[in-house]
Image: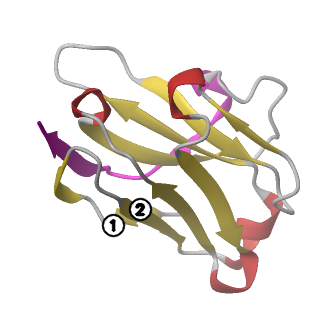
Amino acid sequence: VQLVESGGGLVQAGGSLTLSCICSEDTFSRYPMGWFRQAPGKEREFVAAISTLGVDKEYEGSTRGRFTISRDNTKRSLFLQMKDLKPDDTAKYYCAASERGVSNVADQSQYNIWGQGTQVTVSS
């Protein structure tokens, strides 16, 4: 199973971007999915997560209200709509899948499939 992110880029503060993550396998619909990010010199951190059917969603505090996670199981795709971007949102963003299910969506160790990441840079 492979995950490939896209949609990153350079944007001014206050702007918007939508990240996409496509899964190579039709088993995508079985996986709880998450977005994580890693800024230079910092540890990778949780951003958002979504359940298999897209009903349950969770967000890291600073992104709640600005970011929206969604998925389209028919297209094996995960999305992260980001608005009102801030310089602190600058990071490499990764999508992740869990084949075994998750009890704590923010726990990176519970996700076993990762994409290569896409860079988001927000200028002030």
> Which is more toward the observer, 23 or 81?
81
Q: Which mark is residue 19?
A: 2
The residue that appears at 82% across and 40% down in the rendered structure is 101
Q: Are marks 2 and 1 in contact (CB under 8 Å)?
A: yes
Q: Is residue 72 visible?
A: yes
Where residue 62 sits: x, y (%)?
Answer: 51, 25
Where residue 26 sits: x, y (%)?
Answer: 70, 78
Q: From the image, which quarter does the C terminus lie in? A: top left
> Which is more toward the observer, 112 or 108?
108
Mark 2 vs 1, N-terminal side: 1
Q: Is residue 114 above or below residue 4?
A: above
Q: Which mark is residue 6?
A: 1
Residue 60 picture quarter: top right
Q: Is residue 12 above or below residue 7?
A: above
Q: Which mark is residue 92?
A: none
Where residue 64 sits: x, y (%)?
Answer: 61, 35
Q: Is residue 11 above or below residue 43?
A: below
SS of the residue under disc 2: strand
* Residue kind at label 2, given as amino acid type: Leu
Q: Which residues are magenta?
A: 108-124
> Which is more toward the observer, 34 or 97?
34
Where residue 61 sits: x, y (%)?
Answer: 59, 22
Tell me the CA gap for discs 2 and 1: 6 Å
Q: Image check: 33 left or right of 55?
A: left
Q: Nearer the viewer, mark 2 or mark 1?
A: 2
Q: Image check: 85 left or right of 35?
A: left
The residue that appears at 62% across and 54% down in the rendered structure is 69
